Structures are given as structure tokens and as C-alpha cells.
Image (spheres, rainbow, N blue to C red):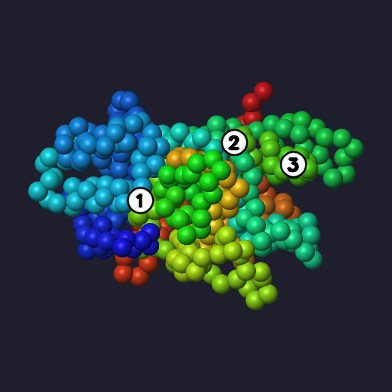
Amino acid sequence: MTRWWTTDETHDPARTSWVESAQGHGDFPIQNLPYGVFSPNGAEARIGVAIGDMILDLAACVEAGLIARDAALLHPTLNALMALPGVMRRSLRRAISALLSDPAMRATVTPHLHVAGDCTLHLPAQIGDYSDFYVGIHHANNIGRQFRPDNPLLPNYKYVPIGYHGRASSIRPSGEALVRPCGQRKAPDADAPVYGPTARLDYELELGVWVGPGNDLGSPIGIHDAAEHIAGFCLLNDWSARDFQAWEYQPLGPFLAKNFHSTISPWVVTAEAMAPFRIAQPARPDGDPAPLPYLADPVDQAHGALGLTLAVYLTSATMRAEGMAPMRLSHGPASNMYWTVQQIVTHHASNGCNLMPGDLLGTGTISAPLREGFGSLMELSAGGKEPLTLPTGETRAFLADGDEVMLRAVARADGFMSIGFGECRAQILPARG
């Protein structure tokens, strides 16, 4: 029986592709095969697969009879493909892998390949809903200590995966610039708030979780079945205006501090591609409560975490003008999550909330206990008190206009080919109005 952590011939590290740029490609070797939506040379948007520096046009492959006809591949979004059951997604993955690894198919398939750099990448799905969680426990501790040094975590944190409903309409693909938002902020010693551009713009290093088949309204998703409702993963930068957030978050939580822009990587690294990189969820510290029964599953604890290394890079306008390489701000493992992605899905649907194909869930900022793995400037600069120094001598407590932030992720496991997520980047433009 195939399970969600089971590997097959598509994960074989010895398998190679006749697409030259796929050989040794850091992100998109043949063992990855992520889905995305692209426009080749200004044409209409269609579904593709990244292979090395190229994109395979799946709709064209269907029309040419190279892949079994499936209406899900003919849409300009991935929603219908995400809705497919896992067994069908695995079958499609095998078919694509065979096309790209069999030298006899080279002449037939090559006309349906496009140079990725010549194409426009779009949001991969029509995002119906977006919810953001707060499962990075070290981030919660690091932020909490700035306000509650002796008791950084609120009492519910270790019992319930905390989350809030975000704004789907302002999610944008990597490369689209971010306009500095305006809003209300109030200094601690001020009598009244002021309105204007945020002075404390921050990034957040997160993973995005794409919902697969989903559930009917009123029908929860059990923890044993949650993995079948995860279609894939992406990188997510949930930009934050920390000064707006401090003023507005009580009593109802995040609002204008979070809904102005979120950036995602455009390629969906499938749940099937991540099978070799499933690892055990780190054990909870002694004395922590066990998950409530609806969130408890030994299989999830044995295979529910992700063997990913995450990193954040920054360039300022001056750095780019001087030809300097991006500065790495932090790096650390994605296993620094208190709850698994399956527990996130199960909890979200536990009250009968219906999740739909193409919905996006954010993990919340993933940080590490030490500074080298902090996932936001709020942590790295100690709330603005300890600015970072860039290679140019510039300093940053929070982000400046012209800065560009890039997130990266690499999945590694002994005995398997590593795969990546591609870039999640955006440059900051000055406020408008």
C-alpha cells in the first residue's frame, strides 16, 4: 500500500533527465517536478512543470497524446489538479517523470519545452481562502520575550494550533514588487496615533501549504487522513507592518498590518516530491502537554515533519548598484514547528470548516532558538534596538525602500537527490498617496 511518505522510482537519485539543465540543478532536478502556471512568450496562462531551467507545457503534452487526457491539466490554474486524489497525482507524476527521463522521447517532447527565463509565472491557483498559523515555537518565544520576558507563550499555545484568517486577494507571486503600506501607528509615549507609511516593515519566513481535495462543510478531516488533503508546498513571505500591528491587534488580531501583500514562490512542490524528506516530528519538551486526541497520531509524529533548510537573503539598492551578493540574514530547519502541517489541516477543519482545493495555509514564521535562525527582523534586531549592519555599512532595524528580500528552501535526505523550492522574492517600493 502506497503511503504519503513512500518513495518510488521517481525519487531514484540515479534517475536522470535528457533535459541538460536538469543535471545537478539545485532546485528542479527530475526528482522534483513542481507544478506552476506560466505564460510562454505572452501566450495564455497554462499549467507547466519545472525541469532544470525549462518548463514543460502539460496542456500541450495532453493535446499531443503524450499524457493521458485529464481536464485538470487544461485549466489555467492548478485548482482542479490539486483536487485529484493522491493516487491520481502519483500516477501523473510517474508519467511526467517517464517522459523526461526516457531519451527516446526527447525529439517528441522537446517542442513542448520553454525556457523558464522567457516565460511569465503566475499564481499557481485561484486562492479561495488563506489562513495563517503561528506554529513556529521559537518565533513565538522570541517575540513573546520582547513583551513578556518571564512568560513569553500564552497559555493556549501548546494546546491549540493558533491561526487567523488572512487576505487571499493580496497574495502575489515572486518578483512582484511590494508597495510600502500606510496605516495607523502609535508610539508608546504618544497621546494619539498618526497615519502614514509604516516605519517598521518586516518580512516573515514561512512555508505555504496548498490544500488538496478538501472537505464538505460540517465534515472534519481526521488527523489520520490529513496528509491526503495536502497537495503541495511553497515558500511564503507574509510581510508585516510591526508598528500597525502593535496598535491594532487588540482585541481582534491582525488586520492592516498583514493584509497589504504576501509573496509566495510560484512553483508548487508536490506532497509526492516531498516523500523522501518526511522526518519525525521533534519530541516535545518534558512537561509539555500531549496533543489532544483529535490531533494525536503516531504515524504523523513519525513522518509528519519536513526535512527542509530555510534561508533569508537581503540586498539593498546600494548593494545591487555595487554588484554585491545578497547577504544571508538567517537559515535553519523547517522542523522548528511545534505542530505538523497535518495537525494544521486537521485543526482548521475540526469545527467543520470546509477547506477547498487551492486554499493556502501559512505556517507562521519559522525561527530557531539561536540568532542565526531567526525568521524576521523583529527578532534579529531585537524589536529595532539592535540594527544589523550590511556589507555597505548601511544599517537595518527594519526594511527600507529599495530593499529586496529573498527566501529559499532546500530539501535534503541521505540517499536521495536534494530538491529546492525556487525563489520567493520581492523588492520594496515607496508608499503611495
The residue closer to the viewer here, 60 or 412, is 60
Residue 409 lies, in percent from the top left, at 45, 55
Q: Which residue is mark 3?
A: 252
Element at label 3:
loop
Q: Residue furthest bottom?
A: 286
Taking 353 as reference, is 11 left or right? left
What's the amino acid at mark 2? Arg
Q: Residue at x 37, y 37 (%)?
A: 80
Could you classify mark 1 by the number of other residues whose Cα lies within 10 Å: few (under 14), some (14-19), or many (20 or more)?
A: many
Could you classify mark 3 by the number of other residues whose Cα lies within 10 Å: few (under 14), some (14-19), or many (20 or more)?
A: few
Quadrant for the N terminus, please: bottom left
Position of residue 254 relative to residue 142, above or below, is: above
> Quarter of the image holding residue 148?
bottom right
The residue closer to the viewer here, 332 or 157, is 157
Quadrant for the C terminus, please: top right
Q: Residue furthest top?
A: 433
| Marks 2 and 3, the one that precedes in the sequence | 2
Q: Which residue is mark 2?
A: 167
> Quarter of the image holding residue 130?
top right
Q: Residue furthest right?
A: 191
Q: CA distance from mark 2 to mark 1?
A: 28 Å
Q: Residue at x 58, y 51 (%)?
A: 350
Taking 47 as reference, is 241 left or right? right
Q: Residue at x 41, y 48 (%)?
A: 231
Q: Which residue is mark 1?
A: 86
